[in-house]
Amino acid sequence: MPVYPGSRIPGKGAEIKKVKKIKAKSAAGSSCIEVTGAAIHPGSCKRCMKPAQLLLESYKREGTINHIEGKNLPSKRAIAGLSEDLLRLVFPGFYEETVLHAHEFDKKIPALLHSVCQRLGKEIEKSLRLMPECPAMKDIPGLAGSFSAHFLESLPRVREILRTDTEAAYQGDPAASSKDEVVLAYPFLEAIAIQRMAHILYKRRVPLVPRMMTEWAHSRTGIDIHPGAEIGEYFFIDHGTGTVIGETTIIGNRVKIYQNVGLVARSLSAGQALAGIKRHPTLGDCVTVYSGTTILGGDTVIGAESTIGAGVFLDHSVPANSLVVAEQARVLVLPKGSAAAADYQI
């Protein structure tokens, strides 16, 4: 059972003792971590000291993944809470535990907007302070506040596009019994809603926060859409698990893709030298991509009205109105124990 300062440990004869302060300097020697005042059961104290020492030694060696006495980072917990509240704003009533009445809008929505604006502004301010050009910036809190306000003013337009996405999902999936079901149950809609909102901040060059938003959605839905991707209206990802859409992807209107589709870069061996270069494919209007397909390369363009079948690996452009299929691989059925089956160890 984890215990913290001020914890009470139940049980007869249980006592709380204090751990002495432990300090560990970073690799640079300029910062330290302190562990102090933690209440630990006497029986577990000795068991904890060795792991603690090993972990503190790790902090000295692996400095790259420490963040000690540095600038304040955007909070993952805060971004998660903001993302949930943003979904409440763009899908009013769908994320509430009780009925939301129209006469409550005038009070509840402005209050929620105010809360989101203040909290988002704080996270944007933290992210702006991490930028190399931060020292030259004037009035960072004011700039963060203006970004936050501009973002919230864009939400009505986001809702217009999300309405088309909801329509595309309902019309494109005979298993959908209603549009309410699409909003309540389809992970794709949550993923694209967060991506469309994060894209606004991405276009304003706000660091960290847009990516944290889409990765929060990724962790919930299994759908990985980079905030930089440009995606048209009436978009639908059916099922969605394992789908990846890279940063420089461009997707037209009325595009439908299925699960486990990758719209990815051809090669990342050049690393950071590729930053800012178009690395991911372009899909024209009314393209359909079936499951298990990988389309890669920044110069790959899938022409409008094309259909890409399941399991295709495509690294070149195709003209409009194309049908692309992978020829079925040869399937062998062999009797176990036969001489021919001896070549296969399963």
Image (tube, rainbow, N blue to C red):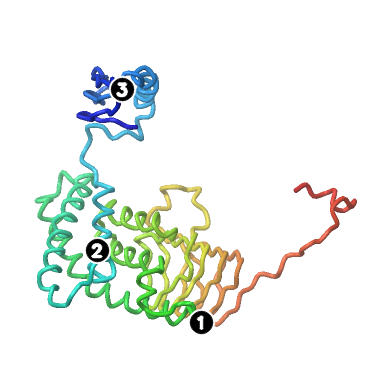
The answer to whether the residues at label 1 and label 3 have Cβ atoms under 8 Å apart is: no
Q: Is residue 75 above or below residue 156?
A: above
The quadrant in which residue 90 appears is bottom left
Residue at the far front: name it. 12
Residue at horizontal 27 percent and vertical 48 percent from the top: 77
User: Residue 272, how many percent across, how many down?
Assistant: 41, 48
- Regarding mark 2 in the picture, which secondary structure is present there? helix
- Dot 1 or dot 3: first in sequence order is 3
Which amino acid lies under the numbered mark 2 shown in the image of this protein?
A: Leu
Give whichever of 313, 91 is nearer the camera.
Answer: 91
Secondary structure under the numbered disc 1 in the rendered image: loop
Look at mark 2 in the image and give the residue it sits on: 86
Which residue is nearer to you in this view: 74 or 50?
A: 50
Amino acid at dot 1: Glu
Q: Nearer the viewer, mark 3 or mark 2?
A: 3
Task: Provide residue 127's location: percent of width, then percent of height.
Answer: 23, 48
Residue drawn at the location 45% of the way across and 59% of the way down: 279
Rate crowding at label 1 as few (under 14), some (14 to 19) or many (20 or more) other CA atoms within 10 Å.
some
Residue where numbered disc 1 is placed: 305
Where is 224 relative to 283, above or below? above
- Left or right, residue 267 beside residue 123: right
Q: Is residue 162 left or right of residue 72?
A: right
Percent x, y of residue 49: 35, 19
Q: Mark 3: give few (<14), some (14-19) or many (20+) Cα within 10 Å.
A: some
Front residue of this view, candidates 185 and 217? 185
Kindly identify which numbered label has been placed on residue 41. Answer: 3
Q: Nearer the viewer, residue 176 or 32?
A: 176
Q: Mark 3 and mark 2: span between their CA atoms?
A: 43 Å
